[in-house]
Image (spheres, grey):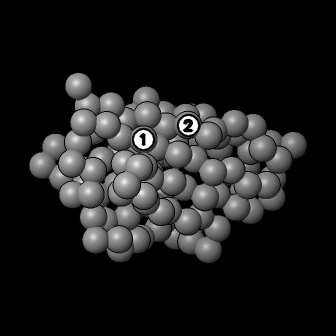
């Protein structure tokens, strides 16, 4: 059974940093485009960052210059380094694996508050 599991969320003060991790199992990980999405209360799920199977990256305008997505194919893992966090970054963050199939993790809560 395919598993996509996020970790690393939590409560952080404005201006702080967090690093999210996502581990995927039972998929041909290097072939998958990996993405981070987020969903705030009352809002639609939105794409935050994507890293393709070839290593190309793209970011939502709202996080450019603050967030960095990376992957480690040897560990079947993708990461999201989040710096200079703002209250508006508060959301549940989801990991997505996309190729011939589409898999989602269960999400991890990120709360930015003083």
User: Are discs 2 and 1 less than 8 Å apart at CB?
Assistant: yes
| Residue at the top extreme, as displayed | 1
Q: Residue at x 35, y 71 (%)?
A: 55
Foreground: 22 or 14?
22
Residue 9 x/y as whole percent: 63, 38
Residue at label 1?
Answer: 23
Residue at label 2?
Answer: 7
| Residue at the left extreme, as displayed | 100
The image shows a total of numbered marks equal to: 2
| Rendered image: mark on residue 13 | none
Q: Residue at x 80, y 58 (%)?
A: 15
In the displayed structure, 107 sits above or below 19; it is: above
Residue 53 x/y as whole percent: 27, 64
Q: Considering the numbered disc 1 on the image, is that residue within a helix, a strand or a loop?
A: strand
Q: Residue at x 50, y 62 (%)?
A: 69
Q: Quadrant of the C terminus?
A: top right
Foreground: 34 or 26?
26
Q: Considering the numbered disc 2 on the image, is that residue within a helix, a strand or a loop?
A: strand
Q: Earlier in the sequence, mark 2 or mark 1?
A: 2
Residue 17 at least partly seen:
yes
Label 2, label 1: how far apart the Cα atoms are: 9 Å
| Residue at the right extreme, as displayed | 114
Q: Quadrant of the N terminus?
A: top left
Residue 41 x/y as whole percent: 56, 34
In the displayed structure, 3 sits above or below 75; it is: above
Residue 42 x/y as whole percent: 52, 35
Mark 2 surroundings: few (<14), some (14-19) or many (≥20) residues within 10 A:
some
Q: Residue at x 28, y 71 (%)?
A: 54
Within the image, what quadrant is residue 5 found in? top left
Residue 44 at least partly seen:
no
Mark 1 surroundings: few (<14), some (14-19) or many (≥20) residues within 10 A:
some
């Amino acid at each position: 059974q395919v598993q996509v599991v996020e970790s690393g969320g939590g409560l952080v003060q404005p201006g702080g940093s967090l690093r999210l991790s996502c581990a995927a199992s039972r998929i041909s990980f290097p072939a998958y485009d990996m993405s981070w999405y987020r969903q705030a209360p009352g809002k639609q799920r939105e794409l935050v960052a994507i890293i393709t199977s070839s290593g190309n990256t793209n970011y939502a305008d709202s996080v450019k210059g603050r967030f960095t997505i990376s992957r480690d194919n040897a560990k079947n893992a993708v990461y999201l380094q989040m710096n200079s966090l703002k209250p508006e970054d508060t959301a549940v963050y989801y990991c997505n694996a996309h190729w011939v199939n589409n898999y989602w993790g269960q999400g991890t809560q990120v709360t930015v508050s003083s």
